[in-house]
Image (cartoon, rainbow, N blue to C red):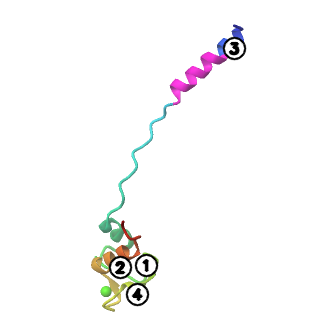
């Protein structure tokens, strides 16, 4: 066996040993409350139109089912769940 080949082999095995990088844990799926809080920029507990012009790919007015010009967490939940693909 040629010395050059041996060196290449040693380098390869060293590379394999050192190549096991640790992946960070994937963050959990954000909860409904987390997503709501993210959209509720001024943290007053409701989403105004200025905070989100559309929610879950639906226009704000469509999500605001009781027409009080704000989207509550309940309305947000309905919009998000209706946008989610059907299960099964
Ligand atoms: Ca708000
Ligand atoms: Ca509303």
| Tags 2 and 3 touching, CB below 8 Å | no
Residue holding disc 1:
52
| Tags 4 and 3 touching, CB below 8 Å | no
The vertical placement of 8 against 40, above or below, is: above
Question: Residue at image x 35%, y 89%?
Answer: 69
Residue 36's quadrant in the figure? bottom left
The segment highlighted magenta reads: 8-19
Which-is-in-front pick, marks 4 and 2?
4
| Tags 1 and 4 touching, CB below 8 Å | no
Q: Does any atom of ligand 1 lie closer than 8 Å to the CB of label 1? A: no
| Tags 3 and 1 touching, CB below 8 Å | no
Of the numbered discs 4 and 3, the one sitting upstream in the chain is 3
Question: Residue at image x 27%, y 78%?
Answer: 74
For the N terminus, the image quarter is: top right
Residue holding disc 2:
47
Q: Does any atom of ligand 1 lie closer than 8 Å to the CB of label 2? A: yes
Q: State the CA–CA distance, disc 2 to disc 3.
A: 66 Å
Which-is-in-front pick, marks 1 and 4?
4
Disc 1 is placed on an element classified as loop
Q: State the CA–CA distance, disc 4 to disc 3.
A: 69 Å
Residue holding disc 3:
5
Q: State the CA–CA distance, disc 3 to disc 1.
A: 63 Å
Q: Position of residue 75 (x, y in %)?
A: 31, 81
Q: State the CA–CA distance, disc 4 to disc 2.
A: 13 Å
Question: Residue at image x 35%, y 61%?
Answer: 30
Q: State the CA–CA distance, disc 2 to disc 1.
A: 7 Å
Q: State the CA–CA distance, disc 1 to disc 4.
A: 12 Å
Label 3: few (<14), some (14–19) or many (≥20) C-alpha neighbours in 10 Å: few
Of the numbered discs 3 and 1, the one sitting upstream in the chain is 3
Q: Position of residue 47 (x, y in %)?
A: 35, 79
Residue holding disc 4:
62
């Amino acid at each position: 066996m040629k010395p050059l080949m041996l060196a290449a082999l040693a380098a390869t095995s060293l590379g394999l040993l050192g190549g096991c990088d640790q992946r960070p844990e994937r963050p959990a799926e954000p909860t409904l409350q987390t997503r709501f809080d993210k959209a509720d920029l001024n943290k007053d507990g409701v989403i105004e139109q200025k905070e989100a012009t559309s929610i879950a790919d639906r226009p704000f007015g469509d999500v605001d089912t009781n027409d009080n010009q704000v989207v509550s967490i309940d309305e947000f939940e309905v919009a998000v769940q209706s946008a989610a693909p059907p299960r099964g």
